[in-house]
Amino acid sequence: MSGKATLEYDGKKIELDAAIGSENEVGLDITKLRANTGMITLDPGYGNTGSCTSDITFIDGEKGILRYRGYAIEELAEKSSFMETAYLILYGHLPSQKELNDFDSGVAAEAGLHYSMKSHFDGFPDNAPPMAILSSMLNTLACYNTELLTTATEGDGFDIPASKIISKVRTIAAWAYRTSRGRPYMPPCPNLSYSGNFLHMMFSQPFDLHEIVPEVEKAIDLFLLLHADHEQNCSTSTVRMVGSSRANLFSSVAAGVGALWGPLHGGANAAVIEMLENIHTNGIKLSDYVDAAKDKNSDTKLMGFGHRVYKSFDPRAKILKEHVDRVLKALEIDDPLLDIAKQLEEVARHDEYFIERNLYPNVDFYSGILLRAIGIPVNMFTVLFAIGRMPGWIANWREMLSHNQRICRPRQVYTGENLRPYVPIGNR
Ligand code: CMC
């Protein structure tokens, strides 16, 4: 489907094509605007800019809808697994049993790291942030797979690096954690599930295997599934941007880790726990905290609240909130931070400031409590987000290349000095 729109400026009319998506979203195509008129559009933060067309994920922020390849997130959360959903996101259809078995065993077979990579881990100081280690080690992985540094989007040239990265990102994450604790590396156990193997590599000790609690394994799997893609967010756009220069998959996803690290994006899951701990330990009144978050002169924000796209609710937050309650009950954990989070949500949801601006809890508001309950240290929270988001980054990188997209190179409106003569240093 397509349509037309007319733009008028300075007495001149320009006809623009409208691209209409399968859910009737309309995007005015301005790709010829500068060539035909000399003008560009201005949209800092890209709130109104569609950077691509995509078949992967659909979000309706007004209605709180999220679908991967047409499947509702609620249904996937209930019936699917992270591995099956990763396949769906990467290849566009739900796998047959054979396709899933092959994908699963391909990923499982790639869990180990080249032994020489140990020396890279040894080079990081004990307090190195795991997100920095993860990003560096994804680039380091490129050094051990130079034959895969291509931009192939089909066949082994794509399938092998994709399953290597999806598998090894979890080993790197677990080894980053162990490095920070001064613990020996734990080799992967191929009989375990994707999430179970991650827990094993994080927490097992030589001669003392970590007991994988089914509720915990399921919770990790659900967390990863809920984070698996989210269309053109900051980190995914970064992966596409880097990949548009025809950079290989390893360096493109390593750049995505950097973008995800920030507290306005993936880093919010850790920032929420820090906020709740601060409120708890210092006995801060919730109404005082909310007042500070509304004060434009303070640096305080209600972390885990608000979203660029969701303006009614974040469906991932709804699923996680229910799950947190169940996991805490199953593990017999009574976390005071959960009560504070629920009360804080109540205060904010009845406050005019948050109502007027459509600010609701996002995925990060409850995910941190879940991860904390299952023993994941706070500085690993965003690393888990990165593990979950990997299928989405890879699928977007592939889609961008298969659309043969031009290099991403935004324009700007220059607002600096006009031409002026150079002043010799003695005359300044
Ligand atoms: N606390 C207080 N005020 C807020 C908050 C918040 N968490 N979020 C937005 N606002 C205000 C903002 O100050 C602005 O007010 P005004 O209109 O008076 O200037 C208004 O709401 C609109 O916000 P915005 O800054 O234009 O929204 P944005 O789309 O640029 O930013 C956001 C979205 C998620 C970065 C922002 O809501 C935020 O900083 N939230 C806290 C951090 C967070 O939880 N991030 C995780 C996002 S979800 C997962 C992910 O992407 O990784």
Image: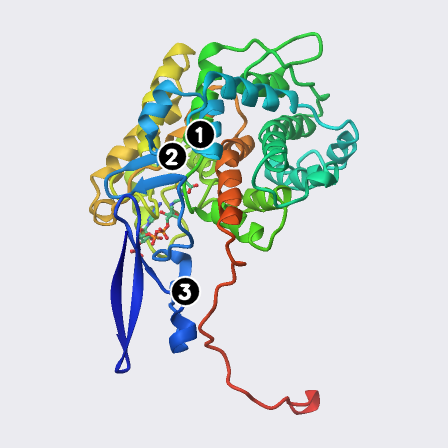
State whether label 3 is within 8 Å of ligand 1: no
Which of marks 1 and 2 precedes in the sequence?
A: 2
Mark 2 and mark 1 residues within 8 Å of each other at the beta carbon: yes
Residue 60 position (above or below residue 339): below
State the residue in front, 301 or 423: 423
Give the residue drawn at x 34%, y 45%.
307
Q: Earlier in the sequence, mark 2 or mark 3?
A: 3
For label 1, count other residues whose C-alpha is less than 10 Å away and answer few (under 14), some (14-19) or many (20+).
many
Determine which quarter of the picture holds residue 31: bottom left
Q: Which mark is residue 88?
A: 1
Name the element at disc 2: loop
Which quarter of the picture shows residue 341? top left
Q: Estimate the spatial distance between the alpha carbons at disc 2 and disc 1, rounded to whole Å.
A: 7 Å
Q: CA distance from mark 3 to mark 1?
A: 31 Å
> Foreground: 211 or 405?
405
The C terminus - image quarter? bottom right
Q: Position of residue 281 (x, y in %)?
A: 43, 31
* Residue 339 can be seen, yes or no: no
Amino acid type for the residue under numbered disc 3: Thr
Q: Is residue 391 above or below residue 221?
A: below
Graded by Cα atoms within 10 Å as few (under 14), some (14 to 19) or many (20 or more), the crowding at tag 3 reads: few
The quadrant in which residue 4 appears is bottom left
Q: Which residue is mark 3?
A: 31
Q: Are discs 3 and 1 less than 8 Å apart at CB?
A: no
- For mark 2, what is the residue? 69
Name the residue located 63 percent from the left edge and 88 percent from the top edge: 422
